[in-house]
Amino acid sequence: MSDDQDKQAKSNIKVTRRCLLTGGVGVATGTAATLVAGLGAEGAAAGPLDRPWATELGDPVGTNPYGHPSSFEKTVIRRPTPTEYSPKGYVPPMNESSWTGTPLQDLRGIITPNGLFYERSHGGYADMDPANHKVVIHGLVDRNLELSMEDLRRFPTVTTFRFLECSGNSDLIWGKATYGGQETSPYLTAQDIHGLLSCAEWTGVRLSDLLREAGADTVRAKWLIVEGADSGALARSLPMARALDDCILAFAQNGEMLRPEQGYPVRLLVPGCEGNLNIKWVQRIEVTDQPLFATFETGLYTDLQKSGKAWISSLVMEAKSIITFPSGGQSLPEKGFYQVRGIAWSGRGRISHVDVSLDGGRNWTQAQLTEPVMSKCLTEFTMPWRWDGSETLIMSRATDETGYTQPFVQQIVEARGKFSEYHNNGIQTWRVESNGEVYNAQG
Amino acid sequence: MRRGNLIFWAILSLMAPGLAVAQTPDCNDRPLCLGRTITEADLAVWSLNVFPDGTGLSDGMGNAEEGRQLFRDKCSACHGEKGVGLKVLLDRGAFPTLVGSTPPLTDTEEWPAKTVGSYWPYPTTFFDYVRRAMPFATAHSLSDNEVYAITAHILVLNDILPAGATLDRDSLMQVTMPNVDGFICDARPDVFAPRCMSNCAVPDDAGVLIGSGESYGKPVPITDCMVLK
């Protein structure tokens, strides 16, 4: 043993002893005694006390100054829609204008860890020096304001829990006919179909406070044109009524500063509304009396109806739910008890009920909602289930506080036509086969 | 003594922050006096927004013939020489198609081609977008004249302008896109789904209810809808 290693070993021992002696006195010493006794009695016999992590020291504290998940969780990552299961023309041609989905089936509760929050960018994502970043508010205002990030963070802050969902989420199950009659793959997972959905605690400043500071003419001005600083300067028209209601410019997500993928150093948050409206890397807000009719609110993200006319400004994400266990790609090892679980959300407010059907939608049972149930935020639901080993079509259905109930996908397609594509909040069916394997049964 | 004074001011400013900040000169006209004021001239150099009524369109002009050259040099590598986006990844990926098809885009067997010509309601959207975002990977590298020229070329390819057309602010405002009347306000909630608990209808049954949104739920706010001309 070299001198250095020796010193290191000694200091580790010291640390261990100090913790034992000064830590929770009775318990700690008691455990230590049992440990020693156990080792003495069982020696090298296989058992919990014989495993490497029980007999050797673990990695030193501080090994990962910014921690990451266990190596056993390495498959729980963001993923693009698998090309092999994608219809023709569906896959983005360049990774700078692309997306990856959140592994919903592997997460618990309602908060998406920052590293797993879904990504959707139209020009890659930049990592901008906040020291050089400014937010400008101009147009129908008493004074054009330029705010540094430091200025912005001095405004009174609010913290809210909100989901974000891409308007194109779940478009893979819009109905078989959607993409030239191609079959929808049974191998798709919750992540593949619904992964453009995440939820976080956001901290930022009220847009209404910024508008007041600039002296915005909120009578004449009906729109804000919000623009990002990324390549492509993505811009959208935000209705003034929403801006004055609950919009914030967020700079923190789940306690830490935004990730570059989420628009570091500052993004717009329009609660309950389609992801694209939540401009990242916000650099400019023009206060106007007319909307921009930007590319992403005309050519894209508009919902073509049967009639040949398209809905413009379909901003709200309607009530929706999905079962994340059991869901596509998972398997049940045997008959017996399982807890069905999933998530529900509504862009119009709180979830009031979630129902689960185990027979293809004929009969429904009300699921348990996990507290807290918050407005425009994911809500977790669970239901106890004893699986008898027979093939089962399992699905969930959300109702929100406005009394709106999530419909079947087929109803939506019938009402809006085959090519409406965006804002699909229909019911997702999974098929549990008698061997326990679970497949997508929607398409 | 001094110390007592400081504490007094600290407490006072906590109780009434307005009082403390109001002392900053030149700033008693706004609530917090954060940030600095700037002029329209400061902003003009990087203003990008172009509205359907022409607000934001720049001076200058461009011709469709120049636009053809420019498009070949700067756009065709991805969007194809004729503006019909190149296919990649065994046809599963495709660059956007900028040319072709005509409205209305009603239900067909094939996915209807939502192109600049067949779908976009205003020509200003094209000018605005190309100037802010294209060429992909080298955004903001075109002059305003070049953007006019490329806009003219794409409108010619879409049979919206005659060959050789020239565009400037005034002539761009004369262009009416074929699908200008193709957009309506969002009508949700549009699908009626009662919260049935037992012996419910399912989609394969006859008679699954699809009603209007008026009978339940909360309509989307009309203030969300971009007012159409």
Image (cartoon, coloured by chain):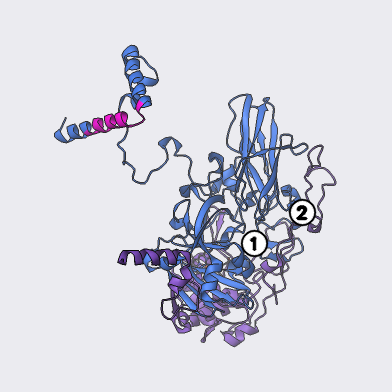
Instruction: Using the rendered image of the protein, determine whether residue B11 is visible from the camera's viewpoint.
Output: yes
Q: Secondary structure at mark 2?
A: loop
How far apart in space, not on screen, are marks 1 and 2 (Cα)? 17 Å
Q: Residue farthest to the right? A: B207
**Image disc number at residue A315:** 1
- Circle 1 marks a residue in which chain? A
**Quadrant showing the C terminus of chain B:** bottom right
Q: Is residue A274 above or below residue A69?
A: below
Residue bounds of the magenta highlight: A11-25
Residue A206 placement (x, y as % from top left): 54, 64
Main SS, magenta residues: helix
Residue A281 placement (x, y as % from top left): 47, 64
Residue at image location 67% in from the left, 79% down from the top: B176
Residue A47 position by quadrant = top left
Left-right relation of A148 to B186: left
- Mark 2 residue crowding within 10 angstroms, few (<14) / some (14–19) / many (20+): many
Q: Nearer the viewer, residue A178 or B211?
A: B211
Residue at image location 34% in from the left, 43% down from the top: A64
Q: Secondary structure at mark 1?
A: loop
**Image disc number at residue B191:** 2
Q: Colour of chain A?
A: blue
Q: Is residue B218 above or below residue B44?
A: above
Please check the rendered image and state whether residue A348 is part of the magenta-colored stretch, yes or no: no
Residue A403 placement (x, y as % from top left): 75, 51
Q: Colour of chain B?
A: purple
